[in-house]
Image (tube, grey):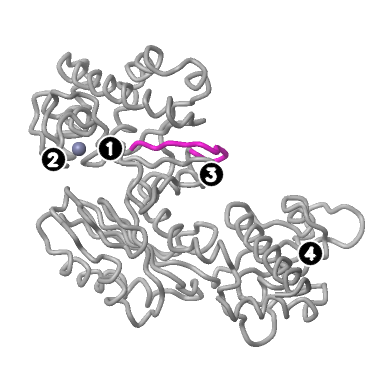
Amino acid sequence: MGIRGEIEGAQAEIRRRNLSRMLRELHVSRPLSRSELAARLRVDRSTVASLVSDLVARGVVRERRRSTAIPQSPGRPSPVVELRQDGPGALAIDLATDWIGAAVVGLGGKVIASTRRDVSLCGTRPEKVVEDLEGLVRPLLAGLENGPRIVAIGVSVPGLVRAEDGHLHVAPALGWRDVPMGQLVKTQFIDLNVPVFVGNDADLATSAEHLRGSGRGTTDFICIWGEGGLGAGIVVDGRLLVGSAGYAGEVGHVMVDPDGDLCHCGARGCLESVVGEEALLRRSGRDPLGGTSALEDLIAAADRGDPLALSALAESGRGLGIGISGLVNIFNPNRVALGGLYARVYPYVRAPILRELEGRAMPAPRAMVDLVTVRLGGNALLLGAAELALAPTLNDPAILPLEQGPAPVEANEPTEAVLSPASSLSAQG
Ligand SMILES: [Zn+2]
C-alpha cells in the first residue's frame, strides 16, 4: 500500500471510530444537539455534521428541531440528534431457572415490548425450550408497529458460555451440558437472518447495571448476583472481563473454605457453596431447595428478630465479605453491587460484609470502594442480552446498510458530499 493508501486507510479508521463513539454517546444519553456532540467527541462541527448524516442515512438517528418552548441562545436553534424508534434493535431472550423472558430492545436500552412465561426449565431438554420460544417470540415480533429492525439476537443463560459461538458448556441449575445454544436459536429463528450471541446471565446483567444502573459512571465495577447459585460480573477499565474464551468471572467458584461442602461444580468449599441460597436456607433450618417461598419466610423471620434467621444471614454476610475482600484486593473496583437474593437481604448482610472488608482488604483499595445494591431490577438480564447483541453495531455502525430513499429529517447541512467514504466502509461490513 502506498503512502496515500495508508493515509486513506487511517482516515477511514478514524471515521469508523468516531461514528461508533457518536452512536455510543446517543445510546447512553438523552438526545443531544450537534454542539453537545461536538463537545463530547472533541471534534469540530463539520465532522459532527458528516457523522450525523451518515447515521441518518443508515436509519439510526434523525434530527429534530428543539421545541420553541425551550429558551435558545440567540441565532439559529440547534436541532437535536435522537435515536429512531424504528432504527436497529435486538431480540433479547432470557432463559432462567424459573422463567423464559423475551423482549425487543431498541438502541438507547429502550424496551419496546417484552413478555415472560413462568415455567421451570429444570429437567426440560434445551431443544424443547428453544422450540417453545416460538410461541413467546413470534407474537412479540408480530405486535411491533414502527418498532426497531431486529439486527441481532442476544440470549442469556445461567451457565458457562463460549463467547465465540454461544456454546453452553454447562448450566448446573438446569442440568444442561454441552448445548450448542447459539446454533439452536439461530436455526429456530433462521428466517430473521441475524447473528445470535449467547452470554452468561451474571455477566450480561452486570454489563446492563454498569451502563444504566448501579455501576453507571464507574470504570471498575463488580456485581455479585445471588440467583440460585452465585454469579458475578467484573468490569475492568470500562469493559466486561471475559477472559480468553468467555469463562472469566466465576467468583462463585473461588474456594473460601478448603473443608467446606461439595459444590455443584464438583469442587469443595466454593464461595457459592458457603454463601449461596441453598447454604443460607440450610443454615437457617429451612429446605435448601425451598426456593422463593422459603427465602421469603427466612426474611420475614429476620424482620421479626428471629435469632437463627439473623445468625444464618450474618454468616452469609461474613462469607460474602471474605469473597469481596479478595476481589477488592485484585481488581480495585470503584463500586461493588449486590443483586438478586443479596439485594433482598442487604440490610442483614451489609454490616458483616463491611466488617470483613475492614479486616481483610488492603486499606487503600478498601477506602475507594462503595458497596451498593443493583438498580435495574428484573430488566437487567434482558437489557444485558440486548447490549451483547447490539455491541457489533455500536462498535461499527457502518455494518448497517445505507437506506434508500430520502433522509427523513430536517437536516440543515449538505450531506451528499460526505457519504461516499462511509459507503465504501459499508461494503466491507
Ligand atoms: Zn464450585
Dot 3: within a 10 Å radius of its alpha carbon, few (fewer than 14), some, or many (20 or more) residues? some
Of label 3 and label 2, which has the lower sequence position? 3
In the image shown, does 10 or 172 lie closer to the viewer?
10
Amino acid tagged 4: Thr
Going from N to C along the chain, the mark reached first, 2 or 1, is: 1
Query: Does the magenta-highlighted stretch encompass residue 166?
Result: no
Which residue matches tag 2?
266
- 413 up-or-down from 358: above or below: below
**Which badge, 2 or 4, comes first in the chain's sequence?**
4
Q: Label 3 vs label 4: CA separation?
A: 26 Å
- Which residue matches tag 4? 47
**Magenta-colored span:** 215-224
Query: Viewed as shown, does residue 405 lie left or right of 148?
Result: right
Q: Residue at x 35, y 45 (%)?
A: 248
Q: Residue at x 30, y 25 (%)?
A: 320
Q: What residue is shown with label 1?
A: 226
Q: Residues within 10 Å of mark 4 (few under 14, many from 20)?
A: some
Q: In the rendered image of this protein, does residue 229 appear above or below residue 398?
A: above
| Residue 164 position in % (x across, y down) | 36, 62
- Say which amino acid is labelled 1: Gly
Q: Nearer the viewer, mark 2 or mark 1?
A: 2
Mark 3 or mark 1, which is nearer to you?
Answer: 3
In the rendered image, the residue lying farthest to the right is 75
